[in-house]
Amino acid sequence: MKKFLFSALLLGAASVVMAQQVITFSYAPADTDPTLLGTGKSETYDLAIALTNPALVGLSIKSIQVPVVPTENISDFSIWITNELQLELVNGKNTNVTLESWSMDYPTEGDVQYVTYTLDEAYPIPAEGLYVGYSFTISVLDNVTKYPIVAAAGASDGSFCIHTSRSYRNWQDRSSEVGAALMVQVELEGEIAENNISLGDVPFNYYAKGENGTVDVSVINKGTAVVNSLEYTATVAGNSFTEELTLADPVPAIMGYAKNATFTFPAIAEPGSYDLELAVTKVNGEELATPVKTVGTIAVAAFIPKRLGLVEEYTGMWCGWCTRGYAAMEYMHENYPEFVGIAYHNSDEIALAEGHQSCSGYPSGRINRGDEVDVYYPIDTMNGFSLPEAWAEACEGFTPVEISVEAEMDADSIVTAKSTVNWAAVPGDVATANYRIEYVLTGDGLYDASWKQTNYYPSNYSYDELDYPLCDFGSGGDYGSSSVRGLIFNDVALLTSGLKGVTGSIPSISADEATEHTYTFDGKYVPCDEGGTIPYDKTKLKVVAFVLQGSGYGTVVNACKCDVKVDASALNTISANGRQVESVTYYDLQGRQVANPAAGIYVRLTRYTDGTTATTKIAK
């Protein structure tokens, strides 16, 4: 069971055979895995769900079931009905106003359970609807009363309404913000059909021309039977077809409960905006006298570009908390081949000399040039490491532009990057958006035996307190010391084209028409911000290219990366920074010289004719 602190369905008309029935209304089935929520404060809670769905008008409330977490430290528990969520000032405090209220005993033992109040006389739901709710007061704050609200993941409007004496001074519908629904169950009686539904809105989305599309739409149960199948007609751009749909996730026999179903619609030949109509004609094989319809607008593009998000990290070897940034970026580098990441080092041996984006503190970063975040904990509603989920979110949604890049280093260590940009749809803000391409040359496998990463975790955390991948830096891990040597740094920014993109790099924007742009880096000399040069391995270079939109640092619209192909003549005669190579020697991890390295990890010592040396940790 999860615990979190947290700071009207549209109905289509249908004529169906009605019968006197009893059914449960809920936004969340009783057998759903509950989530416990709370403000973490000692205060009075008022919680409610809306019974404002037009399909409920004329039905009557027989009983109300409220889920609770048993404890001795909750008092003044009541269940109530009101026609409007409102407050009035009583003894200087905003107090909830009800039509009917019933005081109830609050259970003190056991697990999550339901408290039921059965009305002496069924209460009819009027045309304007009702709200059903419950109230209680936290008398002592403890591990239970910090999280006194029983809810379930998923939300609809009106499924989570809250007022409290300290945190929420006015009634608020927090359904969408919390992403959960109260697990209140309401037993209703009246004339109810066995097979009946309504449909939610058709969401706006982009689809590729010439291909059948699918759309997820909510199916809301208005009958007494589980909804297992539908027959519907999809109409768009003058074309239509009829299909039988078996729901992969049937809708439970709970009045007002919704599940998404995937509807298919015909292919559209030309890009543009179109109205899509879905009309359900049968539910569970029973024909409806009047089809249940929903209509929405969709867009069609020349093609659907693949979207990759960009993660930029700001770090430094001197920063003791930056080990978590290192752990996060290394995890992504090792486990997600398409991950596009850049590590900007500050005030250390591999610090970028120019083109370093500013940040408020270390470690930190940005995803798609958005707000500054901690790259280990970018999603603050998740416990622990959340970069994989954050990057996945950055890769979602439609982007109008596709970008790819290829790069090569010649014998003079000049890296030439050529990007190709193709627009699937012309964005509406072309004149003011200021689209540009930015390039960053990055290096993998950066290593020197003298480098050490400061690590604050051993003295502050135990191994058991740290989740993977950060746990290695705790006192129980392989890297559990205050200064960690032997780390290999990847995705390190070496050279950039400038943080605001290259002026004129996107000369024109036309749908399904590609443009190319070329940018060069001089790899003979890669300066370090702390002086000298950054040693890098020519065989482990990448170019990251991305499309920026807007002024300043801009927003990343799409990103890509590629390995740098290296001219064979450049590998042995010229080092990373233009010095002549005198000899190359390999050593194993015990310091023994190895003539012909086999599979394993080795340290490569390169001597130059100017008397300098460089060491690189390699894996064969």
Image (cartoon, rainbow, N blue to C red):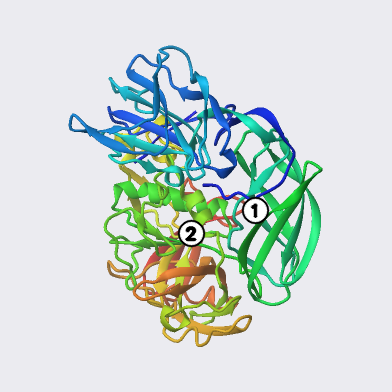
The residue tagged 1 is 216
In this rendering, the label closer to the viewer, 2 or 1: 1
Q: How many marks?
A: 2
Residue 527 in view of the camera? yes
Above or below residue 360? Residue 548 is below
Q: Residue at x 56, y 44 (%)?
A: 54
Real-space CA distance between mark 2 and mark 1, rounded to the nearest whole angstrom: 44 Å
* Secondary structure category for the residue under label 2: loop
Observer-nearest of 287 and 180? 287
Image quarter (top left, top right, bottom left or bottom right) of the C terminus: bottom right
The residue tagged 2 is 445
Residue 587 in view of the camera? no
Q: Residue at x 43, y 12 (%)?
A: 109
Characterize the local packing of mark 2: few (<14), some (14-19) or many (20 or more) Cα atoms within 10 angstroms: many
| Image coords of residue 217 (percent x, y) | 64, 52
Q: Amino acid at mark 2?
A: Gly
| Image coords of residue 404 (percent x, y) | 58, 74
| Image coords of residue 589 (percent x, y) | 49, 47
| Image coords of residue 603 (percent x, y) | 48, 55
Relative to 540, 486 lies left or right: left
Of the image marks 2 and 1, the number of the one nearer the N terminus: 1
Q: Residue at x 70, y 72 (%)?
A: 209
Q: Amino acid at mark 1?
A: Asp
Q: Looking at the rendering, which quadrant does residue 477 occupy?
A: top left
Q: Residue at x 61, y 62 (%)?
A: 296
